[in-house]
Amino acid sequence: MQQEELVFVGICDLAGLVRGKGFPASELESRLRQGVGLTGSNIMISAFGTIFSSPFGTEGDLVMMPEATTAVQLPFDEGAAEHFYLADIRELDGRPWACCPRDFLRRALTALAAETGLVVKSAFEQEFVHSGIEERPGDAYSLSSFRRQGTFGESLIGTLRAAGITPDSFLPEYGPRQFEVVVKPTFGLRAADEAVITREMIRSVAERMGFRASLAPIMAPDGIGNGTHLHFSLWQEDGTPAMHDAAAPFGIAPRVAPFIAGVLHHLPAPSAVTASSVASYFRLQPNRWAPVWAFLGQQDRGAALRVCPIFPGAADAAERQFNLEYRVADAAACPYLALGAIVWAGLDGMRKKMTLPPELPAFWSMDEAARAAAGVRTLPRSLGEALDLLEATDEARDWFGPKFLSAYLEFKRSEIAALDTLEPSDICDRYAAIY
């Protein structure tokens, strides 16, 4: 049987899934110049494959323009090679489309650099459930679980490196059959590109080994969730770290403290972007190793924003290691929107010269009244609540632009409506089948 190599060009859409089109590899050079066609309503395809609602209708044409730096071309012993590109969405005249997720992040990073001279270095930790290992009691973080996953971890790490991503670690996690893969941080837009590619490599390696990896936010309403924790730090454009000052509160340098204050100030609203599924809020519950309160904590995995430790003896000096972890995120989120929302919120903090709250070393011994008196807010308890907070955030209209914000709110509210009659367990099953 005759075969011809195909190349796929796709976007990571509002559901955090990669969708696009394939074409013969012989046309790659021309497609890199002219792109691949798309229509606006494609961005409104829900996680479940249905367009529940769209402001764009059936009219109009756009272009997916492949970004050469995102190329993945990996041969496998069995089956077709992985050969794909991630793309920007542009108008026919070459202008960025108003609802392009990748451009949402690019605009945030460009504004941050122009106004402050700072750049973002970041990485996504991605948790998932691996079907190819038997669930056993007591397996959390265990060598036994690590051993019994066979060569999946080794294959995934090798595949990531071959795809141009530098792996950091692979480990058994707290939940049943749960694992985590971490990659090294990188600058700018590339970090979100790598988050998308990493997800696809997790799925690809599992499928090629006859298994399935699910990055769904949570597999059962009372289960352990899969988080996608986002580590970030701020640097000067010349490559000098700008984040750390050991003498300052939280160890955060005064110059960048307003950025962190901005993220913290806006934190409940961006949950609509970073924890963007109905099932996400089954994970964000007390005693789930997931945040419930919008506070900044020193090395506290219950905090929404965690100041990460500095390890003695590491090759990097303290100021190069120092970073914060944003923990209100999962793989239902589009990485470009998730990182972009953090950058926009932080930039707003710098514009308004916001200040950090005092440290709360006794946070977990405080009652709810004391936390509220200290200005600590609870995170949204549902996607609908998060969307309402996002819509009520005046600054978000500038971050997204009115067209994009309206489309995003319509997209997510139609997803809520589609699941409205289902029980929580059925909702989890729906997402687990997709992610």
Image (spheres, grey):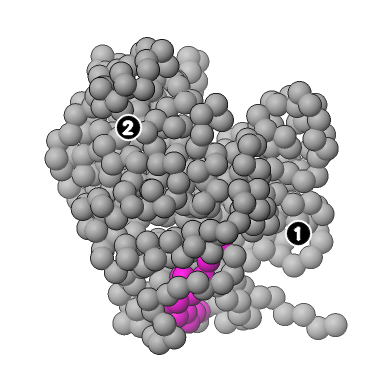
Q: Nearer the viewer, residue 94 or 211?
A: 211
Pinpoint residue 227: horizontal percent, then vertical percent.
55, 40
Q: Residues within 10 Å of mark 2 (few under 14, many from 20)?
A: some
Residue in the picture at 46% in, 32% down: 291
Q: Is residue 414 above or below residue 247?
A: below
Write down the residue under mark 2. Answer: 377
Image label count: 2
Horizontal relation, residue 174 to residue 251: left or right: right
Q: Which residue is mark 1?
A: 76
Say whether residue 397 is left or right of residue 409.
left
Question: In this view, which residue lies farthest toward the front?
Answer: 421
Residue 240 in view:
no
Residue at the image position 28 percent from the left and 41 percent from the top: 266
The residue located at (29%, 60%) in the rendering is 400
* Left or right for 272, reference 287: left
Q: Quadrant of the N terminus?
A: bottom right
Q: Residues within 10 Å of mark 1 (few under 14, many from 20)?
A: few
Residue span colored magenta: 31-47
Is 256 magenta? The answer is no
The CA span between labels 2 and 1 is 49 Å
- Is the Cβ of the residue at disc 2 closer than 8 Å to that at disc 1? no
Image location of residue 416, percent across then percent down: 49, 59
Name the one closer to the observer, 288 or 323. Answer: 288
Circle 2 — which element? strand
Residue 148 seen in the current view: yes
Report the residue that reaches farthest toward the left.
352
The secondary structure type at the circle numbered 1 is: loop
**Quadrant in the rendering for residue 149:** top right
Picture quadrant where residue 126 is located: top right
